[in-house]
């Protein structure tokens, strides 16, 4: 019998306080549509940071982003909005993509990893891969160096007020090349269509003001995006929220602005 490849085996638990438990990882792998991608993410994260976050929804939304971005070619440019401490940019860079990682969090994570690390914080990804550039700034103040072939955001848009979120989505449309991908993983208040309205324990704004799933879809279609995938996962294991996944493609020329090629 041939030995298993590294992609077929998950790196063992590291003992870090925020590392996903063996039981939770086994459950996630057993139900994953692409367990190979989850294993790659776990291995990459444990190698780089010493843990794979125990926040169970990230066993779903991280592989979802990677699977969608498998379809874009090597040397493509990608933007990660709210990168935090995540293996997603690292795996994309390993596959030959160039990623700008934007995060405004005031906590700066500097290796070596410490016991209090989690998926929150600003990390300078350029220290780990030449294809990665980190920007510690608010996305509303970010100036992209060029058009992007794909933009993604994982569990970050709901931490913004509705006004800021809507402006960021308008800018995403402007920053994408024609046929560019926009991938959004968004938390939703359980058993409702209201977007999750809390960030690090604080209310961002009241749910009615913060908006609903339909508000996001309506804005995206109004900006000229074609919705390619829409999923709303309810009662997710060990999650305080329901999970919304939207993948869309930039089509019309509404709102285009000039950037350097």
Image (cartoon, helix red, strand yellow):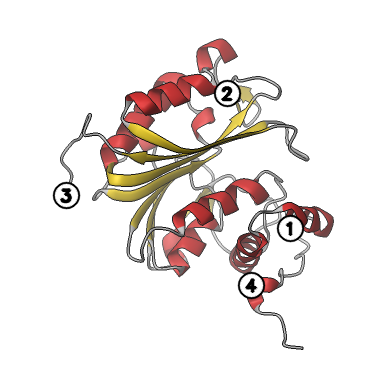
* In the foreground, 209 or 232: 232
Relative placement, left or right, of 126 versus 197 is left
Asked whether the beta carbons under mark 1 and mark 2 sit within 8 Å of each other, the answer is no
* Residues at marks 3 and 4, CA–CA distance in whole angstroms: 38 Å
The image's mark for residue 29 is 1
Decide which of tag 2 and tag 4 comes sooner along the chain.
Answer: 4
Closer to the chain start, of discs 1 and 2, is 1
- Give the image location of residue 258, x and y in percent: 15, 40
Mark 3 or mark 4, earlier in chain:
4
Q: Is residue 183 above or below residue 187?
A: below
- Cα distance between the residues tagged 1 and 4: 12 Å
Query: How crowded is the residue under tag 4: few (<14 C-alpha within 10 Å), some, or many (20+)?
Result: some
Please say whether residue 146 is visible from this viewpoint.
yes
Please report contact status of discs 1 and 3: CB closer than 8 Å, yes or no. no
Label 1 or label 3, whichever comes before in sequence order: 1
Give the residue pinned by disc 3.
260
Label 4: state its secondary structure.
Answer: helix
Q: CA distance from mark 3 to mark 2?
A: 34 Å
Residue 202 drawn above or below residue 129? above
Q: Position of residue 250 (x, y in %)?
A: 32, 39
Q: Are marks 1 and 4 in contact (CB under 8 Å)?
A: no
Q: Residue furthest bottom?
A: 1
Q: CA distance from mark 1 to mark 2?
A: 27 Å
Residue 141 spot, x, y in % from top left = 32, 35
Q: Which residue is mark 2?
A: 195
The Cα atoms of the two marked residues, 2 and 4, are separated by 35 Å
Q: CA distance from mark 1 to mark 3?
A: 42 Å
Can residue 118 be seen from the camera position used here? no
């Amino acid at each position: 019998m041939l030995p298993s490849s590294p992609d077929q085996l998950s790196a063992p638990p590291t003992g870090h306080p925020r590392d996903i438990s063996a039981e939770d990882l086994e459950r996630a792998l057993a139900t994953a549509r692409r367990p190979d991608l989850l294993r790659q993410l776990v291995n990459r994260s444990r190698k780089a940071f010493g843990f794979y976050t125990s926040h169970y929804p990230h066993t779903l939304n991280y592989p979802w982003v990677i699977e969608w971005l498998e379809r874009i070619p090597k040397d493509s440019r990608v933007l990660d909005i709210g990168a935090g401490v995540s293996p997603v940019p690292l795996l994309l860079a390993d596959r030959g993509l160039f990623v700008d990682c934007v995060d405004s969090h005031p906590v700066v994570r500097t290796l070596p990893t410490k016991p209090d690390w989690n998926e929150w914080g600003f990390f300078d990804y350029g220290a780990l891969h030449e294809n990665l550039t980190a920007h510690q700034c608010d996305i509303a103040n970010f100036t992209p160096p060029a058009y992007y072939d794909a933009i993604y955001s994982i569990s970050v848009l709901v931490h913004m007020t509705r006004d800021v979120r809507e402006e960021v989505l308008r800018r995403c449309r402007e920053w994408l090349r024609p046929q560019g991908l926009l991938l959004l993983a968004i938390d939703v208040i359980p058993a409702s269509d209201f977007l999750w309205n809390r960030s690090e324990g604080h209310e961002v704004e009241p749910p009615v003001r913060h908006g609903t799933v339909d508000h996001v879809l309506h804005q995206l279609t109004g900006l000229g995006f074609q919705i390619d995938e829409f999923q709303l996962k309810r009662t997710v294991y060990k999650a305080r929220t329901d999970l919304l996944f939207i993948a869309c493609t930039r089509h019309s020329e509404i709102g285009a602005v000039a950037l350097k090629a």
